Amino acid sequence: MTKKKKKSRIYIIWIVNLCLITAVVAFFVWYESVPDVSPEKVLKTYMAHISNREYEQMYEMIDAGISGNISQEDFMKRNSAIYEGIGVDNIKIHITSYDKEQKEICYETSMDTVAGNVTFENNVSFIQEKGTYKLVWSDSLIFPELDSTDKVKVSVTNAERGQILDRNGRVLAGKGVASSVGVVPGKLENRDDAISQLADLLEMKVEDIERKLSAKWVKEDSFVPLKTIPKVDELKLLSLEPDKETLDEKERHEKLLEIPGVKISDIGIREYPLGEAAAHLVGYVQNVTAEDLEEHDGEGYTSNSVIGKSGMEGLFEKELKGQNGCSITIVDSNGNKKKIIVSTIVENGKDIKLTIDSNLQKELYEQFKDDKSCSVAMNQYTGEVLALVSTPSYDNNDFIRGMSSEKWNALNEDENKPMYNRFRQVWCPGSTFKPIIAAIGLTTGAIDPDEDYGNEGLSWQKDSSWGSYYVTTLHAYEPVILKNALIYSDNIYFAKAALKIGENDMESSLTKLGFNDVLPFDIKMAKSQFSNTEKIEKEVQLADSGYGQGQILVNPLHMACMYSAFCNEGNMIKPYLTYKEDAMPDVWIKEAFTKDVAQTVLEDTKEVINNSHGTGYAAHRTDIILAGKTGTAEIKASKDDTTGTELGWFSVFTTDKNMERPIMIVSMVEDVKGRGGSGYVVKKDSQVLEKWFSGN
């Protein structure tokens, strides 16, 4: 074969192959461009439109004539009402068989609804029109048992929210009864005057009442709720000396009922019996917002739900809320139940029992309610937190009954910050920090408890490098040893002790005690710190840290945990808030101090309370041995500031592990300058302890 013929043959083969390839590609392009009009494909497409709420596209896929001449409007209305009413989502089908002759598909459907997952078997017929398949639609395509005159009903049984209880089973948050005040518009006389009276009595704006009365649904004989107010406590009225609040509420109810058209009825609400005394601890619930529904999608919330917004209500929301019961039912035209499609049983919320003692919580609040303060109380041997109080406070019941914008603004604009939760914050501890420094010094070996540091008078500086800065103290005494330094609360001694410890050991020791770390507790607390930076920067800062000044900031509960080590052979106890029977201590920091060190500091802090020269002697008792430490922290803009305020502290605790009700209280009060300093706090806590030891 010549080269010319051979080349020609190769060329022909190449052309043929190219044609074949072109033909194959063209076939696949054509094949892909032809719609899949099989009944299976049509059914799957139809079901996909349901999930996407594309009812118009669904209608285009049915043969309206054979499907009962249903109009597009009626079709869309029927399907949207049912599918959206039951909250259909994640719809899936599995085709089990296809009868080509009858053009009928049998399939299984699975879908999520507001009442749970639904699965059922169904079938659908098709007709072929101009090369395409269309569904023969009837109501049974939605549910097999559904007829055109039937309705699909969704019934919801609301879960009862769990209660929040104290350690003795007393209610901190639970079911209560209030008075719902409303109006029947057609019975109002002198409408403008009546609305003005209502606005005054209910602390509402006239325009807000008008807006409620002019809602589209309101008719002349409608009952229009305006506001929920406290129910008059009949038992308090029957007492020998009813309190002013109860009498005022009774008078308000009477004046409201004098207005023609006004009705007052009982209504179930969430109630907080301790009110202001535990508002920062317990928190409150509110109606869900659109943002809440989006954030908690799929968790069972509806537009009528409430959700915990703060405190224990927010912390234990999942446990408290429960799960609503729900059923989807087909009912006939007479309202008779025909078929239960799916049903879930209501699960009421769980009760949460706390370690809190209501009486102690109330007593601490009553003592400090007019102050800017915070108090924590705990069983120093078990870690059970007995009280968490922040003052001034607010009434969390107001969030349930309805709070006026004026009251909300007043709360937020109050310079004393009643909404501010002080027990979660960190504060300059002042001299209450000295026992911690003593324990660190003894543990590191920097302090010899019997070494006499010498009487320096009432002011001292290390050397001239400190310039004009001096550490000052209030009392001169001898010998200047650790026990006396704690009794007299000597700043100079502890400044010297801090310098002996040194910044490296101070930082490492405080880090070991949980500084700059998260407190292991149910409620998130601010972290205690020893510096505004990562380290103690200057010698003067180190000296000031020795007596709880400088840049030392401590959370009150953290302070209580550190003090607990003095009662537990050097181990710091972990605090907790959820009640447990037969509570056993859980150690947070093992061997924070040695057993001997803890015992030494314990004995010295007993002297602070029981020695007549001790700064805490006002809390001394003859029946029970207490220990503790006072503290007055100066809050200044600068070293030369003479206008700064003072924080008053008192940490006090029982020392007998075997006593029936051991307790430790740490209280802090702002602005005690000119009011007795820490002595003001000692007096208040002593009254609390008196009630506690008497069993009240």
Image (tube, rainbow, N blue to C red):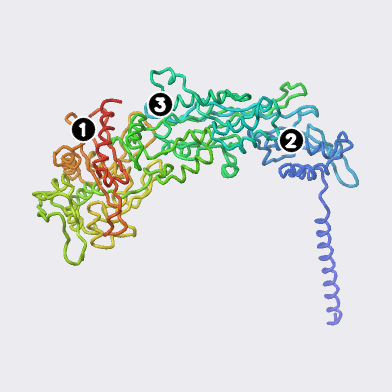
Residue farthest to the right, as pictured = 130
Residue identifier under label 2: 81
| Left or right position of 502 against 122 | left
Determine the CA span between mark 3 and mark 1. Answer: 28 Å
What amino acid type is highlighted by mark number 3? Arg
Place of residue 165 in the rendered image (x, y in percent of width and height, measured from the top left): 42, 29
What amino acid type is highlighted by mark number 1? Asp
Tag 3 secondary structure: loop
| Left or right position of 25 against 251 | right
The crowd level at tag 2 (other Cα within 10 Å; few <14, some 14-19, many 20+) is some
Place of residue 434 in the rendered image (x, y in percent of width and height, measured from the top left): 22, 48
Determine the CA span between mark 2 and mark 1. Answer: 70 Å
Q: Quadrant of residue 359?
A: top left
Q: Quadrant of residue 588?
A: top left
What amino acid type is highlighted by mark number 2? Ala
Query: Vertical placement of 389 versus 497: above or below?
Result: above
The residue at the point 16 percent across, 64 percent down is 463
Residue identifier under label 3: 170
Query: Vertical placement of 17 versus 669: above or below?
Result: below
Place of residue 255 in the rendered image (x, y in percent of width and height, measured from the top left): 54, 25
| Left or right position of 569 against 334 | left
| Left or right position of 555 against 484 | right
Which mark is in front, 2 or 3? 3
Residue identifier under label 1: 656
The residue at the point 28 percent across, 57 percent down is 641
